[in-house]
Amino acid sequence: MKKTWIRLAVIFLLTVVFLYFFIRGVQWKEAFRYSTNVNWLLFALVILLTPLHLVTRGYRWKYLLIHEKRDVKFYNLFAGNAIGFTVTFIFPGRLGELVKPLYVARKENIRAGFALGTVVVERTFDIFTMCFLLGFFLLAQPLYPTAFKIQAGAFKNLYLWGIVGVSFASILLILSLLFYFFREKAIRVAGFFLKPLPHKLNQKILNLLHEFIDGLKFFHSLGNLLIYTLLSFVVWLGIIFFYWLFFLAYRISIPYLFMIPYIFLTAVGASIPTPGMIGGLDAFSKLGLTTLFGMDPNQAFGLTIVVHAIQLVMTCLCGYAILWREGLTMLQLRKLGETIEQ
């Protein structure tokens, strides 16, 4: 219980700190004026396209689950993503990352540990894909020196966050490969550290670890690896398109590829485990809009609020519609995620 309260206190502190940087110096009337100056037809299209990433993520996920079950229903993959993001939006600590695979595991009769292993692969490839796109953008910078002028320190920050992202993803990838290709040694090491625990709990965790490693079978198939890599680019290019269209609705024409560093920064902000991604995503979005595109801080604030609200509301509508259809509650899902956390 004490550990939980400490974690919640840290999350609360992070939320407050990032909200402070996001709200600091905002003129509310100006921000409101900017946020209502919109092409409503394009804005409606943006709203309709909000769940697009749930579709592309669901289709991509199928190639990770194929080693456990070949005929996984696409609806369950879409529903798992929608429910997972809904839980992440509502509860702190990115609990949805656990709920998502456990939901699909129950619906498709797949081992829980296996499903959890696929999510580790998914997040690793998300980071690598965005870092690759950012690297491509930075390397191509000499080709557009006059077309894309940003503040002096912005490129330095992009390089820094890019290095952090690649480092984190590389650590995850190396650990995953070590677990998969040196399975027995990894199990023995884990067993050594689990010895102080009660025997029943010890065995439960080790069984879950076995299933988790099975979820990494994806690395054994070159064909699936290539397809999954391609689909990862489809997922993130679709997300970039969503934001590009959003700014176009506000009569802000930013070349499609110039959106890459902004999306990278928002992804960094979204990874901070605050409830609803509030604070982290917002502060990094505002930072990106002001430093990369020279946008007025009030405009950056207003547009960030709108795009964040669209994603939160539309995702939660999808998630709650699925929960209502299946007779589930958010409390049940929270407990489902907490069973693994504990």
Image: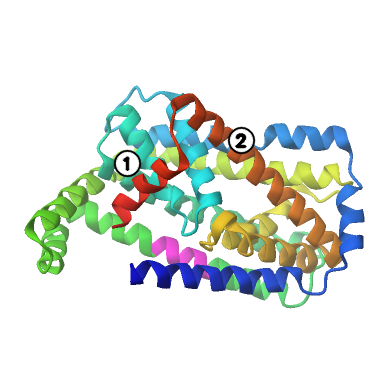
Percent position (x, y) of residue 89?
56, 50
Percent position (x, y) of residue 243?
72, 46
Q: Residues within 10 Å of mark 2 (few under 14, many from 20)?
A: some
Quadrant in the rendering for residue 274:
bottom right
Closer to us: mark 2 or mark 1? 2
Question: Circle 2 — which element?
Answer: helix
Q: Residue 115: say if magenta.
A: no
Is the C terminus in the top left, top right, bottom left or bottom right quadrant? bottom left
Percent position (x, y) of residue 162?
56, 66
In this view, the residue in front, 191 or 107, is 107
Which of pointers 2 and 1 lies earlier in the amino acid sequence? 1
Task: Left or right? Give the position of 263 relative to 338.
Answer: right
Span shown in magenta: 163-170
Q: Is residue 252 above or below residue 273?
A: above
Distance Cα–Cα, label 2 vs label 1: 25 Å
Q: Residue at x 12, y 62 (%)?
A: 191
Q: Is residue 225 above or below residue 19?
A: above
Residue on which disc 2 sits: 317
Q: Residues within 10 Å of mark 1 (few under 14, many from 20)?
A: many
Q: Residue at x 30, y 52 (%)?
A: 340
Principal secondary structure, stretch drawn in magenta? helix
Q: Which amino acid lies under the numbered mark 2 shown in the image of this protein?
A: Leu
Q: Residue at x 69, y 58 (%)?
A: 262
Residue on which disc 1 sits: 115
Quadrant in the rendering for residue 182:
bottom left
Q: Looking at this rendering, what residue extends furthest in the left direction?
A: 199
Percent position (x, y) of residue 139?
64, 62
Q: Determine if residue 126 is in view.
A: yes
Q: Determine if residue 59 is in view.
A: no
